[in-house]
Amino acid sequence: MTLKLGVLALLTAKPGKEAEVAALLDAARGIAAEEARTEVWYAFQVDGSTFGIFDAFADDEGRQAHLTGRIPAALAHVGPDLLAADPDIRLIDILAVK
């Protein structure tokens, strides 16, 4: 498996919604596990209100399947209630993997 592409999404929780965002990301782990072409998936917390998702893919077809899948749909659905702003989603190229 050669990981070439990724997605970095940064999320800022509304005040008082941090636990709900963390719970949402924990629940999303099960969805990511069902995505055969999502090779790597991490959810993380940067600080009190900033969260993120990083995922990696071997090809653009896998990345596009993820971007049109259930996790982005869930974020779009609950985002207005939980997030202070739209997610900052960045498509990245992976330069090196250990």
Image (tube, grey):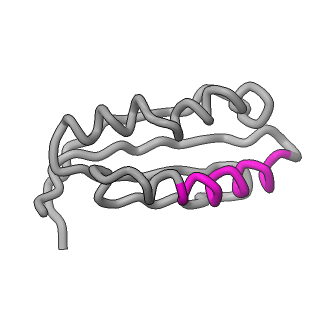
Name the residue rendered at 46%, 60% in the picture.
42
In the image, the segment drawn in magenta is 17-30
Quadrant location of residue 30?
bottom right
Task: Give percent across and percent down for residue 84.
Answer: 73, 31
Give the left or right position of residue 38, taking residue 5 as reference. Answer: right
Q: Residue furthest right?
A: 16
Taken as a whole, is the magenta stretch helix, strand or loop?
Answer: helix
Task: Give percent across and percent down for residue 32.
Answer: 46, 53
Task: Give percent across and percent down for residue 33.
Answer: 44, 59
Task: Give percent across and percent down for residue 40.
Answer: 34, 60
Q: Is residue 20 magenta?
A: yes
Give the left or right position of residue 47, taking residue 29 as reference. Answer: right
Q: Is residue 55 magenta?
A: no
Q: Quadrant of the C terminus?
A: bottom left
Q: Residue furthest bottom?
A: 98
Residue closer to the observer: 83 or 63: 63
Name the residue rendered at 64%, 49% in the picture.
50
Q: Total marks drawn?
A: 0
Q: Quadrant of the N terminus?
A: bottom left
Name the residue rendered at 88%, 46% in the picture.
16
Residue closer to the observer: 76 or 84: 76
* Residue 75 versus residue 18 in the image, above or below: above
Quadrant location of residue 76?
top right
* Residue 11 versus residue 95 in the image, above or below: above
Give the left or right position of residue 64, taking residue 67 as reference. Answer: left
Name the residue rendered at 24%, 50% in the picture.
57
